[in-house]
Image (cartoon, rainbow, N blue to C red):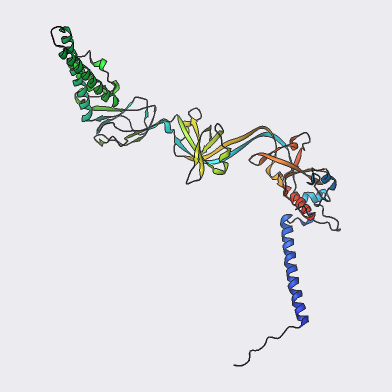
Amino acid sequence: MPPRPQRPRMTRVEVVAALSNWALSIVTTAALATVGWFGHATHWTFGLAAHADGHEPPGHAAPDHGAAAKGHGDAPTREADAVHFPSKEAMERTGIELVPVEERPMVSELVASGVVHYDQRHIAQLSARVPGSVWRVERHLGDPVRKGDVLLVIESREVGSLKADFLNALVAHEARREQTEILENLQGAVMGRQLREARSALREARNHLHNAEQALVNLGLDVSIADYEPLDDDARAARIRIAGLPDTLLAVLDPDHITSNLLPLYAPFDGIVIGRDAVVGEVIDPTEPIFEVADLSTMWVVLNVSKEDAGRVALGQRVRFRPDGAADSYESRVAWISTEVNEETRTLEVRAEISAAAGAAGLRANTFGSGRIEVDRRGTAIVVPRISVQWDGSRWVVFVPDGEAAFAARPVRPGVQQGDFVEIVGDFAGGNRPTHVVGAGSHVLKSQIVLGRMEAGEL
């Protein structure tokens, strides 16, 4: 094999030249990175960073050692931090604007999505208590109903059988009672055992009668033993045949077509029929609901609050709910807070109740919307625009005028936030309160303060 050509060795001069080029590339890259960082930090306002005559940049404030000495312990304070512009024109070129410090009510709110539901305490799914078929339908979907109104009439042989059992039990009880009375009148002429057996049979007959009465009451029929005892057999049969049917319904029914097998289904409370699954002649089963009635005088609004804000919600807080696409909102208060976070959405369910007085009639179940929960309120607060409050790396500050073309940083403590405004609490709200602060352009001043603290080795 031919010998492998050897790579020529670099001379000392070439090595030094290569290292110099490599070092120059690193320095250039670092310089470009520094320029990029400085431009981002100052929002590329290099006119504020240096004067043409080489003096100190107008945005740089020398450390105030006197102020630091006045601080607590060794912690320095920079209440005298300021940004000075060479002229008013230079300041105006940065876009700085002054805004007034205002006093106004402030409300802190949580925003959460929500949905409207029926009041679950006043919604009923109704079914027949015995098997049978639909004989007549009195109410339809969307009809308003009052408590006790007949929704439909069921025809069931079991109902007729229970009515017959009641009449038979009433007759048997009367027979036992008459027999016992006769034996008691002949007490001296009959054996004591016969009288005891008659009295025992009378008690048994009364128990059967009460059971028969209770069976009809369980069906929702207003039947009482006392009402039937004074009547003869024909009157009893006529009365039990139409038991439970209201007079308004009897007025439109043909007496010849009324049987003892009829059982009405009543509305349990005032409301609206929101569901109906029954037609005449249809066979029904007691386990299947055939009517659904809801009371619309109160509607529920269920809000889904993020778990991070769950600790700020409390009973009684004000709630404003606006359905999607609606111009009006509905006001209420927090009435219930779930004891668990939803496993799927990882949110906390909070419920508010909208009453009729608050406009519940205008809400529709299953409507989505947005709710606002008021978690804090200030009757009168000192507020500034949100853009006026800046974080300088260690504290929140606002900038106040300190001369014609200078601004000083004032430390503040933000409070309640509402919209584009934020409350300022603490000493700032005292007697030394400024009338104006910097709004637009406050970030430029913050950048100058941060840059000055970095150059002083404080950041």
| Residue 34 position in % (x across, y down) | 74, 61
416 relative position to 287: left or right: right
The residue lying toward the viewer, choosing from 418 and 458, is 458
> Would residue 174 appear left or right of 221 to someone viewing this image?
left
Residue 122 is situated, as x and y percent measured from the top left of the image, at: 41, 30
Whole-percent x, y for residue 105 in the image: 66, 33
Up-down: is 78 above or below 380?
A: below
Q: Is residue 112 above or below residue 269?
A: below
- Quarter-wise, where is residue 252 in the image? top left
Question: Measured from the top left, where is residue 22 in percent x and y?
Answer: 73, 73
Q: Quadrant of residue 376?
A: top right
Q: Residue at x 74, y 58 (%)?
A: 38
Left or right, 195 with respect to 320, comes to left
User: Viewer-proximal residue, 125 or 46?
Assistant: 125
Q: Quadrant of the N terminus?
A: bottom right
Residue at 17% x, 15% y is 198
Q: Is residue 325 visible?
A: no
